[in-house]
Every structure is written in structure tokens, then in C-alpha cells.
Image: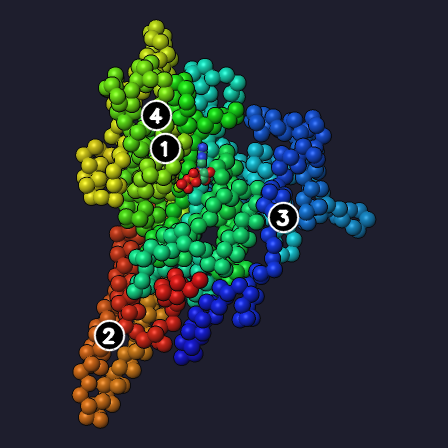
């Protein structure tokens, strides 16, 4: 059993890799002599930023580009030619040999196809060239990207279009560099095949409605409103040696079997603990690369589960934040190797310890720097704040189903509602004071001594709302945290774009509706204060059921939520039903974010991913049981029966051996029959259409996998260490 010895050896070897500059002979990719560059000096140096453009472009060209970035003006192809040349020269200086249109297909990750700058010339040599046409539009062979039926295979072409608002950047590799141009990806008929296009459209809708509302408030000089986002990313790091010996981690992104170690996260000593050397070196490297790419990373720390960490940036314009979030995930993954580590972004890589999520912090900001969700210190600012806050409350209540849908993936099902992540029921946490204010608003005149008179009712200002800690509710899926909302139910591996498309669009609609209401009342000769008060009161009356400040993990909340008539769908499969609600189709088409075909295509893609994810898990579980667990158990059984046999010959009564043999034999029987069952359900796809396939996965494959896991984990606990050759939870989670 050569495997056995090597497993033991690799555990020690992995542990040694964590010693910086140790004498173990490993090249860690880091050393004590390294001095990190100043982050402010390198920040954005690999981006074709506004500053770089100001330097490199003729003034009129620069102004034209800025008009596109700031006001959304279409770019003139002649100007694109000039920008392209400047961009190429800049990129070549930085070592780039190729360029790519970088886009976000509906797989949830990013895609790139590289083209060299090289063009042969007539003299037998070559020159580096890059034209405006190549900058503005690309035509990847797109037939293999999911389109949800939008693009028939005979019309495989799609095109990518330059997103001028997100800076081009340079991705380095050990042998060179590539100029990456953020692009949108659409079919030739103009339908969005990506995540960026609807995101930009939703931002435009929000812009339009928020500007209209600000005008009602008499706010001057604002020409643009955009949503802002800061996404906190959780992830796991384990030694790569273990990962490469775990087919489940490699193929499914999570462990499909694995017995809980005697210790998990009970001691809670990892959270915010000191960061292990190797991990810190890795994080520093990741941050350095992200700084160069202009991603404003701000915080790093240990998370709750052993081997779990978090990285978070400073918030940015949503479109850029979404691009940067993708880059963050990419750099986290690729840098791990350099340190002998393996980065796991999956929502639930290890059963029994916390999974990973992404807290998406969201607000709205004007181009003049007003945060629309920031309570101010004048009555006017407060009215404005309450208006936008009320709009969000209305939006979330009206479209709980869409928010739930936007985070529905097979992987996130392991997290939501599992007392470690937000419940699958959407509700809003406002914090004590703000909740009280809304309650008062509904009643009309507040009692003396309470939050006193708001708005036209007397007191000029809101009580100061706590910005930090104390007033936190970790169990809420959607929490107001002082000057932004935090959507906490987003999965760690998913693109943040779809949840943001939903948020922007539902906010746009609510702002639209509330503004219309105010306008109507103004026409009826109400004062602005009266009109606003009526509108806010109506929001509270109509939507207060969504506000919940208690413990979201409790069973009492489930009962209460049911009483309140909140949308409750525990599984993704149920949540996908929201695709067919007429209100949703109408919403997205009215605000020009998705037409009906685009919307229904999303359903097909999400279902397809759900089906494939579980299908792969089912096959991988079966293969592990068949090729790893069962053989190990049988080897052990052979040892046991041989011992029992020889004991008998020697005349020794060995009840311990007999009992162990019997137990192991029973477990082998159970595993075998669970495996047979799994193989049988795997062989069947459950039907022809995606819906029945997904139902089959949920109803048949998942339970069959759980059964296999149950007996496999039982066996893992009794099989001798030297016969078990898969890395264990203990090794993966505690060797750092
Ligand atoms: P926490 O205590 O949850 O870590 P922080 O104040 O550190 O809270 O913020 C978490 C995230 O929220 C950061 O990424 C931060 O940039 C982001 N954030 C702060 N203000 C805003 C805003 N106005 N819009 C969007 N995100 C914001
Ligand atoms: Mg947070």
C-alpha cells in the first residue's frame, strides 16, 4: 500500500510549507527578505485609468471618452482609433503581447480569447497593431457559451462590445502579459448573453428614476445617480497537496464525503485570530496584484470556520465593483498555487463547519457625492434619506421572490437557512432606532419624548443612527448598516451581477412609484412635506411585514414569517418558479433590463447549471464510494477476517475482532446498497425537459448521495488510518 505511506508523508510536508524560510527545502514563493511595494504607489498601475488617458490622449479625445464614461454618450469610431493606439502603446510598454475582450458569460465566471497584436508586414517582418474596430467590437466564437436558447446553434455568433466605463487592465503571467478590455456580450440580434449588459441597463433605470426623485426634493446639480457596491468575499484555503488528492474538491468544488473531525469550529478561536504566516504571505500577494489592477482591497481576516478567510474592498460604482469582484475571485484562485495552497470559493466545501457567502453592501450615490442612504443632519436630508430607504423597503417586500431567485444555486442551498447563513426567507433589518422611526411615521404624530417630531412634525433631525457594531443582526439576510444595505445571502462563488441587477431594478421601480405618488399629491395641492409623509406612511402600512429585527435562525421566525405571508422557498428549485411570475416579466421589460426572451433564457441557464452541478456531484460521489471507500473497507475487512481465522486456529477467543468484523461488514453492506441505488438514479436523467431533470436531481440524486455519504463517513471513522488514503477533514482544515 504505497499510497498510505505517501499520504502520511504529505501531511507533514504540507505542514512544513507553512514555515516561512524554513529549512524544509520548499520553495514557498515568499521569503523573509521581501519588501512589499507601497500600495499607493502601485495602485492602478496596470489599468488604463482616467489618469493614464489624460496623459496619453489628445485633449479633445480625452474629453470625448470622459463624456462617454460620465454621461453615457456613444463613442465615435474615429476617436476609438486614437484610443486604441494609445492603449496598445501603453500595454506593449507594460509587456503585453496580446489583447482580449474580457466578458462575463452566463456561466458566472469570466471569458477571454486572446489575439496577438502582431500583423505581418510586406517586408517579411511584423508590426504590433490594434485598431479602434478591434477595441470597440469583438466576435468570439461564442457557440459554447450558455445562451438559454436565445442563440440557435446555426447562428452561433455573438459579439462583444467595449465597456468604456470600466478601465482596461493588464493581466500578467510568468511569461508575459495580456491587455484585457472589459466588454459586454450579446447576440447579433442584440440580446444580452452576459451579466454586464443587464447590469448596465439596470443602473441606467435606477439613474433615471433617482434623478427624477432628487428633482422632487429640489436637489440641484446632480447629473447622475449610480448604485455603489462593496462585496465581502469569504473563502477557504487548504494545502494543495490535499486538494489534488480529493477528486470531489477538484471536480465538484466541495467535499462530497468526509467524516467530521473531533474538533470543528466549536472553540471559535479562529475567527479574527492571528493569520498564519503562509496565508498572510498569500493574502499580501493577492492584494498587491489587485492593487495593481486598481481593486481597492481594504480588509482581510480569519473567518469563523477553521481555514476560512475573508477579503473585502472599498465600495465602488456597481459596474466596476462587479468587474473587480470577478478579478478578486480570479486572483484568489490563481495565486494560491504559488504558496502551495488551494483556494475554495464554494458555498459549502466542508459539512459541519460554516460555509462561505458574499455580503453585498449596496447603496446609491450621486455624481456629486451624496450617498442617498446616508441619514443627514438637516431635516431636508433626513426626508430624502427616509424616502430612499422607504423605496428599498417597498422594493424588497414587493420582490422577495426575485431576491430569493437571484441567489438560488445548488451550492447556496447548503447554506441558506442552515443557522450559519441568513435564512431563505427574505426580510429587512433596520436597527432599533430606524425601525422606531418608521413605526412612528405610520402612526402619524409621535408621542412626546419619543423620536420626537420628524419631518414636518417637529424635530428637525433624526437621532444619530449607529453606524457600527452593537446594532447588528447577523441573522438578517438584508440589513441596514448605517448608510447602506447589506445583502448577506449571496453565495461565495456566484457572480454578484444578477443579485445587483435585481436590486437596482426593484429599487428603480419603487422610486418611480413613490415619486409618481408624490407628484399626484402635489397636484392635489398638498405641500411637499404632506405628500411625502403620506407616501412614507403608506409604505410602512403596506410593507411593514418585511421588517424584522429578531433572530432569523429561530423556528419562531419561520412561524411568524408564514403568518406575515412572506415568501418562503427553502430550495433553489422552488425559487426558480419566480421566473414565471407575470409581475417579474413585466417589471424587467418595463425598466428595459430584460426582454421576455432574455428573462426566460436566464431560467433555462440556471436550471441547466443546477442540473449539471448535482449530476456531477452524483457521479463523483459514486466514483469515490466505488473506487476509494469500498476498496479500503474491504481491505480492512480482509485483515479482520484473516485475524479472526487465525485466532480460531490458535484457539483464542477474540470477541473484539469478531464484533469489529461484524460491524464493518454491515457498513460495507449498507454502503454497497446505497451505492447501487445512487448508480441507478444517476443512470436516469429524470426526463427530457430541464424541469424534470432538476426535479430528479433534487428528489432522487441528492437523497441517494446523502445515504452514500452517511455510510462512507461511518466507515471512515473505523477504517485504520493507514488504509484510508483520502485526505481527512482534520488534515485539510487544520494544517496551515
Ligand atoms: P462591516 O462591518 O460589515 O465589515 P464595513 O463598514 O467595513 O462593514 O463595510 C463593509 C463593506 O461595505 C465594505 O466593502 C465597504 O466599502 C462597503 N460600503 C461602505 N459604504 C458603502 C456604500 N455607501 N455603498 C456600498 N458599499 C459600501
Ligand atoms: Mg459585513
Tag 1 secondary structure = loop
Work out whether 373 lies above or below 123.
above
Foreground label between 4 and 2: 4
Residue bearing mark 4: 463
> Is tag 2's residue or tag 3's residue first in the polypeptide sequence?
3
Q: 648 or 50: which is nearer to us? A: 50
Residue bearing mark 3: 178
Q: Residue 688's x, y, as percent?
A: 33, 49
**Residue at image point 57% right, 49% down:** 289
Q: Residue 77's x, y, as percent?
A: 66, 30
Check the picture and name the quadrant holding the N terminus: bottom left
Report the Cα–Cα distance between label 3 and label 1. 45 Å
Foreground label between 3 and 4: 4
Report the Cα–Cα distance between label 3 and label 4. 52 Å
Q: Circles 4 and 2: CB distance less than 8 Å?
A: no
**Residue at image point 69% right, 26% down:** 60
**Residue at image point 41% right, 28% down:** 373
Q: Is disc 4 surrounded by few (<14), some (14 to 19) or many (20+) residues within 10 Å?
A: some
**Residue at image point 29% right, 55% down:** 702
Tag 4 secondary structure = loop
Q: Circles 1 and 4: CB distance less than 8 Å?
A: no
Work out whether 224 lies above or below 95.
above
Residue bearing mark 1: 466
Tag 2 secondary structure = helix
> Is tag 1's residue or tag 2's residue first in the polypeptide sequence?
1
Work out whether 170 lies above or below 15.
above
Report the Cα–Cα distance between label 1 and label 2. 58 Å
Residue 570, located in which quarter of the rendered image?
top left
Report the Cα–Cα distance between label 1 and label 4. 9 Å
Residue bearing mark 2: 664
Residue 653, located in which quarter of the rendered image?
bottom left
Q: Residue 149's x, y, as percent?
A: 43, 41
Amino acid at each position: 500500500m504505497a499510497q498510505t505511506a505517501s499520504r502520511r508523508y504529505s501531511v507533514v510536508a504540507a505542514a512544513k510549507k507553512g514555515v516561512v524560510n524554513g529549512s524544509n527545502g520548499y520553495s514557498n514563493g515568499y521569503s523573509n527578505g521581501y519588501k512589499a511595494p507601497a500600495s499607493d504607489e502601485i495602485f492602478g498601475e496596470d489599468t488604463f485609468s482616467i489618469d493614464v488617458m489624460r496623459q496619453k490622449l489628445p485633449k479633445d479625445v480625452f474629453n470625448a471618452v470622459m463624456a462617454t464614461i460620465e454621461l453615457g454618450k456613444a463613442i465615435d469610431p474615429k476617436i476609438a482609433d486614437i484610443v486604441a493606439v494609445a492603449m496598445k502603446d501603453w500595454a506593449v510598454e507594460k509587456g503585453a503581447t496580446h489583447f482580449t475582450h474580457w466578458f462575463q458569460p452566463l456561466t458566472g465566471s469570466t471569458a477571454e480569447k486572446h489575439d496577438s497584436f502582431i500583423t505581418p508586414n510586406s517586408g517579411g517582418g511584423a508590426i504590433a497593431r490594434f485598431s479602434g474596430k478591434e477595441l470597440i467590437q469583438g466576435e468570439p466564437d461564442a457557440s459554447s457559451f450558455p445562451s438559454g436558447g436565445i442563440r440557435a446553434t446555426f447562428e452561433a455568433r455573438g459579439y462583444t462590445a467595449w465597456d468604456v466605463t470600466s478601465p482596461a487592465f493588464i493581466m500578467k503571467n510568468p511569461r508575459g502579459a495580456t491587455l484585457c478590455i472589459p466588454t459586454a456580450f450579446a447576440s447579433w440580434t442584440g440580446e444580452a448573453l452576459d451579466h454586464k449588459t443587464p447590469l448596465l441597463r439596470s443602473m441606467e433605470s435606477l439613474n433615471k428614476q433617482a434623478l427624477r426623485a432628487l428633482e422632487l426634493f429640489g436637489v440641484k446639480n446632480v447629473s447622475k445617480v449610480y448604485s455603489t457596491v462593496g462585496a465581502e468575499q469569504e473563502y477557504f484555503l487548504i494545502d494543495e497537496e490535499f486538494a489534488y488528492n480529493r477528486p470531489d474538491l477538484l471536480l465538484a468544488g466541495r467535499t462530497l464525503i468526509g467524516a467530521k473531525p473531533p474538533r470543528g469550529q466549536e472553540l471559535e478561536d479562529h475567527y479574527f485570530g492571528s493569520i498564519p504566516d503562509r496565508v498572510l504571505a498569500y493574502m499580501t500577494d493577492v492584494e498587491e496584484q489587485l492593487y495593481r489592477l486598481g481593486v481597492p482591497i481594504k480588509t482581510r481576516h480569519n473567518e469563523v470556520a477553521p481555514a476560512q478567510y475573508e477579503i473585502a474592498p472599498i465600495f465602488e460604482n456597481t459596474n466596476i465593483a462587479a468587474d473587480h469582484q470577478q478579478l478578486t475571485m480570479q486572483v484568489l484562485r490563481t495565486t494560491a498555487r504559488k504558496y502551495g495552497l488551494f483556494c475554495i470559493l464554494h458555498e459549502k466545501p466542508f459539512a459541519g463547519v460554516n460555509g462561505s457567502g458574499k455580503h453585498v453592501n449596496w447603496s446609491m450615490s450621486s455624481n456629486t457625492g451624496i450617498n442617498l442612504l446616508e441619514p443627514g443632519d438637516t431635516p431636508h436630508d433626513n426626508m430624502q434619506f427616509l424616502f430612499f430607504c422607504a423605496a428599498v423597503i417597498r422594493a424588497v417586500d414587493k420582490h422577495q421572490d426575485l431576491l430569493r431567485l437571484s441567489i438560488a444555486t445548488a451550492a447556496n442551498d447548503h447554506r441558506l437557512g442552515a443557522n450559519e447563513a441568513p435564512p431563505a426567507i427574505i426580510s429587512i433589518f433596520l436597527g432599533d432606532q430606524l425601525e422606531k422611526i418608521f413605526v412612528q411615521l405610520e402612526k402619524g404624530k409621535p408621542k412626546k419624548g419619543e423620536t420626537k417630531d420628524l419631518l414636518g412634525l417637529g424635530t428637525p433631525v433624526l437621532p444619530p443612527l449607529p453606524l457600527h457594531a452593537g446594532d447588528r443582526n447577523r441573522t438578517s439576510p438584508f440589513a441596514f448598516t448605517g448608510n447602506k444595505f447589506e445583502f448577506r445571502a449571496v453565495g461565495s462563488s456566484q457572480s454578484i451581477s444578477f443579485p445587483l441587477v435585481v436590486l437596482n431594478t426593484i429599487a428603480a421601480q419603487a422610486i418611480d412609484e413613490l415619486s409618481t405618488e408624490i407628484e399626484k399629491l402635489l397636484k392635489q395641492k398638498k405641500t411637499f412635506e404632506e405628500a411625502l409623509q403620506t407616501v412614507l406612511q403608506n409604505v410602512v402600512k403596506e410593507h411593514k411585514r418585511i421588517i424584522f429585527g429578531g433572530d432569523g435562525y429561530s423556528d419562531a421566525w419561520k412561524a411568524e414569517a408564514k403568518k406575515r405571508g412572506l415568501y418562503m422557498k427553502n430550495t433553489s428549485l422552488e425559487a426558480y418558479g419566480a421566473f414565471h411570475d407575470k409581475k417579474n416579466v413585466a417589471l424587467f421589460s418595463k425598466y428595459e433590463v430584460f426582454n421576455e426572451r432574455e428573462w426566460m433564457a436566464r431560467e433555462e441557464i440556471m436550471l441547466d447549471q443546477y442540473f449539471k452541478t448535482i449530476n456531477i456531484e452524483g457521479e463523483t460521489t459514486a466514483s469515490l464510494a466505488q473506487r476509494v471507500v469500498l476498496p479500503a473497507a474491504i481491505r480492512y475487512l480482509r485483515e479482520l477476517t484473516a485475524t479472526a481465522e487465525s485466532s480460531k486456529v490458535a484457539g483464542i477467543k477474540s470477541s473484539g475482532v469478531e464484533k469489529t468484523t461484524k460491524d464493518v461488514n454491515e457498513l460495507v453492506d449498507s454502503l454497497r446498497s446505497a451505492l447501487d441505488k445512487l448508480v441507478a438514479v444517476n443512470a436516469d436523467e429524470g426526463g427530457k425537459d430541464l424541469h424534470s431533470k432538476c426535479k430528479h436531481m433534487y428528489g432522487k440524486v441528492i437523497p441517494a448521495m446523502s445515504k452514500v455519504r452517511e455510510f462512507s463517513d461511518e466507515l471512515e471513522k473505523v477504517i485504520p488510518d493507514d488504509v484510508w488514503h483520502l485526505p481527512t477533514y482534520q488534515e485539510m482544515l487544520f494544517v496551515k
